[in-house]
Image (tube, rainbow, N blue to C red):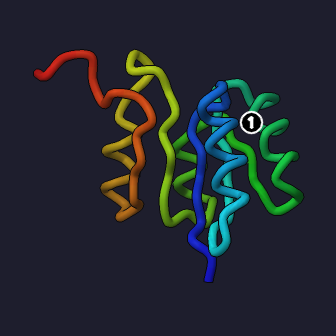
Amino acid sequence: DNLRFAILGCGYMGRGAAKRLAALPGVSVTAICDRNLEAARAVAADGGASVQAFDRFDDLLDRAPVDAVVIALPPFAHDGQLEAAAARGIHVFVEKPIALTVA
């Protein structure tokens, strides 16, 4: 069985993560999420017809088959996505710093 990944963020790092993960044996990218749905659709299309695109992370969590998520957002855009995924038992890889301060 493939390890199913979602990518949150379609900037340079998110697009790169999607390509690198898709090239690994035993891994598939099943969902892409970005607040710009057209950007998410473009990245998803690169992965094939089975990759779903979302503009709301909660929708992705509710509807996409995901074992792990790569959060490739700038720190200021983190808004509970890590906690939401972890609360559902989804493994989380954070591309950027988790927070802007230690507190």
Q: Looking at the picture, does residue 85 appear above or below residue 11?
A: below
- Residue 83 occupies quadrant: top left
Q: Which residue is at the far left? A: 103
Q: Left or right of 21: which side holds 95? A: left
Q: Looking at the picture, does residue 60 appear above or below residue 40?
A: below
Residue nearer the viewer, 68 or 54: 68
Residue sitting at 55 percent across and 63 percent down? 66
Residue nearer the viewer, 4 or 84: 4
Q: Left or right of 10: which side holds 74? A: left
Q: Position of residue 99 (x, y in %)?
A: 27, 24
Q: Position of residue 58 (x, y in %)?
A: 52, 45
Instruction: Count the labels in the image.
Output: 1
Q: Looking at the picture, does residue 54 appear above or below residue 31?
A: above
Secondary structure, mark 1, is: helix
Q: Position of residue 84 (x, y in %)?
A: 37, 47
Q: Which residue is at the far bottom? A: 1
Residue sitting at 27 percent across and 16 percent down? 100
Residue nearer the viewer, 19 or 90: 19
Q: Which residue is mark 1?
A: 40
Q: Amino acid at mark 1?
A: Ala
Q: Position of residue 93 (x, y in %)?
A: 42, 47
Residue sitting at 79 percent across and 46 percent down? 44
Quadrant for the N terminus in the image = bottom right
- Residue 54 occupies quadrant: top right
Quadrant for the C terminus in the image = top left
Q: Residues within 10 Å of mark 1 (few under 14, many from 20)?
A: many
Residue sitting at 75 percent across and 53 percent down? 52
